[in-house]
Image (cartoon, grey):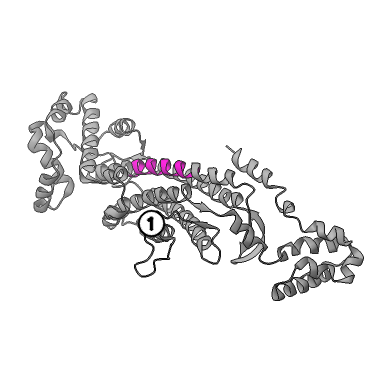
């Protein structure tokens, strides 16, 4: 990822120095196990560890010649550590190091993303509770439907990101495996106890059966989860963008005193942060299909997945980290306008009470078809003429013959639409 969309903590996971440090940790853990099993002489790990240095520039120089990153790494370590380094990588294949390292990097990134989601959940919950009873219009197809509250709107996102957290936890667990099984996964040249030892030391699970690689369906799940989270971010961002439109203006991104909205139009305040999240979501989702295609490799392994993962690993995780951080700040500093919500709620003169009137008519003896027809007629008339829907209804003698005017007026009550809100909040926020 470019610097503009990168944060230091997760970016450092994907830097070459960290990668090679993990490679060395894997090699030393394997050698430590071999020492305990008397496969290599005792003292090798201590001597190598005391002398080995990660020199990214030197590794790159060697790789330019040998065209193999793991060989270049091992050669560089040997230059510093001396003859004891010949015991490193005994019976192992490159993918034992590469795949175990990649999974560690994904796990490290995933744990940062979990923290990001936790911080986001705090801000969403805060806004949900604060605006639990802040009335606004609910929309379907972009059209006014029936009243809801802004708190309920926020609560839907809170629950969605709770689900995303569970998905990510599951995907981290799925990806946290280690393979130290040799050239085609048969352990022909290495003891399975080495793999068990390395896995335990690195806080991973043993891959039950690998080929030359760890199966890529695990990675496909991980990146698919990132894609789902990105889509949830975009859903939130699109909601903010719609609600910030001039004609709506129920919420608005925070706009600093010195901030500029347009190079040409000084009056502009644009939802640029939310728009940016929509773009980042597209980028993150673009990693999903290649991850799925990486599952189908030739026989025990080919390297068609390699270049893909070198790109989507850092890019998808770094972009998602940035997106979650940005969304958290948007929600934390969001300008919310309850008065404008109420104004928008009233702009259709009560036609959103149409369902309640229809249901009351059916209770009073109208067939559903007749009730729907008469209510729709008056709702359309009120909408067309910008007149009171209640006034249209009570002008109909057939209706007031069945339902007294005073009773009809009581149907036009916002509290009717808010009476179950506590139930919804309780079953969402009390759920473990």
Determine the image quadrant of residue 431: top right
Q: Position of residue 369 (x, y in %)?
A: 81, 70
> Is-magenta flag for residue 223?
no
Q: Nearer the viewer, residue 4 or 286?
A: 4
Which residue corresponds to the image point at 34% horizontal and 56% vertical from the top-left? 294
Determine the image quadrant of residue 380: bottom right
Which secondary structure type mostly characterizes the magenta part of the structure? helix
Q: Can residue 199 be seen from the camera position used here?
A: yes
SS class of the residue under badge 1? helix
> Is-magenta flag for residue 109?
yes
Q: Where is 37 relative to 397, above or below? A: above
Determine the image quadrant of residue 8: top left
Q: Can residue 185 be seen from the camera position used here?
A: no
Q: Position of residue 303 (x, y in %)?
A: 26, 55
Q: Is residue 111 left or right of residue 238?
A: left
Q: Which residue is mark 1?
A: 284
Quadrant housing the N terminus = bottom left
Which residue corresponds to the image point at 33% horizontal and 46% vertical from the top-left? 214
Q: Nearer the viewer, residue 431 or 28?
A: 431
Q: Is residue 66 left or right of residue 30?
A: left
What stretch of residues is rendered in magenta? Answer: 106-121
Q: Is residue 348 left or right of residue 396?
A: left
Q: Position of residue 131 (x, y in %)?
A: 59, 47
**Residue count near mark 1 (Cα–Cα under 10 Å), binned few <14, some 14–19, many ≥20:** many
Quadrant housing the C terminus = top right
Residue that protrudes farthest toward the right in the picture: 401
Q: Is residue 248 left or right of residue 347?
A: left
Q: Nearer the viewer, residue 164 or 332?
A: 332
Which residue corresponds to the image point at 61% horizontal and 50% vertical from the top-left? 152
Q: Where is 70 relative to 362, above or below? A: above
Which residue corresponds to the image point at 48% horizontal and 51% vertical from the top-left? 334
């Amino acid at each position: 990822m470019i610097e503009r969309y990168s944060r230091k903590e997760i970016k450092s996971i994907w830097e070459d120095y960290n990668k090679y440090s993990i490679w060395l940790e894997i090699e030393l853990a394997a050698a430590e196990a071999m020492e305990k099993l008397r496969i290599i002489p005792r003292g090798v790990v201590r001597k190598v560890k005391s002398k080995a240095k990660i020199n990214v520039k030197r590794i790159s120089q060697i790789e330019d010649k040998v065209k193999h990153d793991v060989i270049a790494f091992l050669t560089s370590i040997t230059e510093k550590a001396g003859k004891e380094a010949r015991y490193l990588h005994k019976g192992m294949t490159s993918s034992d190091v590469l795949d175990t390292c990649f999974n560690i990097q994904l796990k490290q990134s995933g744990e940062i993303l979990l923290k990001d989601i936790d911080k986001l959940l705090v801000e969403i919950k805060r806004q949900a509770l604060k605006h639990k009873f802040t009335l606004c219009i609910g929309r379907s197809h972009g059209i006014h439907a029936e009243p809801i509250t802004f708190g309920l709107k926020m609560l839907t996102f809170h629950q969605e990101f709770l689900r995303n957290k569970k998905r990510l936890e599951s995907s981290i667990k799925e990806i946290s495996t280690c393979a130290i099984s040799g050239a085609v996964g048969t352990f022909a040249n290495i003891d399975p106890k080495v793999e068990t030892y390395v896995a335990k030391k690195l806080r991973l699970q043993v891959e039950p059966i690998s080929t030359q690689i760890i199966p890529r369906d695990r990675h496909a799940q991980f990146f698919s989860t990132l894609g789902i989270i990105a889509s949830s971010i975009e859903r939130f961002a699109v909601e903010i963008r719609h609600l910030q439109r001039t004609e709506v203006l129920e919420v608005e991104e925070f706009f600093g005193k010195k901030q500029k909205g347009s190079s040409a139009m000084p009056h502009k305040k644009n939802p640029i942060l939310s728009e940016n999240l929509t773009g980042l979501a597209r980028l993150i989702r673009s990693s999903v299909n290649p991850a799925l295609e990486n599952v189908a490799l030739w026989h025990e392994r080919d390297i068609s997945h390699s270049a893909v993962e070198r790109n989507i690993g850092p890019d998808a995780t770094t972009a998602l980290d940035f997106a979650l951080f940005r969304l958290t700040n948007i929600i934390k500093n969001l300008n919310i306008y309850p008065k404008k919500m109420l104004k928008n709620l009233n702009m259709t003169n009560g036609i959103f009470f149409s369902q309640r009137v229809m249901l009351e008519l059916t209770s009073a003896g109208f067939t559903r078809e007749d009730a729907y027809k008469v209510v729709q007629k008056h709702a359309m008339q009120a909408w067309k003429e910008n007149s009171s829907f209640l006034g249209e209804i009570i002008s109909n003698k057939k209706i007031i013959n069945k339902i007294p005017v005073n009773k009809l007026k009581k149907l036009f009550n916002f509290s009717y639409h808010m009476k179950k809100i506590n139930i919804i909040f309780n079953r969402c926020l009390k759920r473990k």
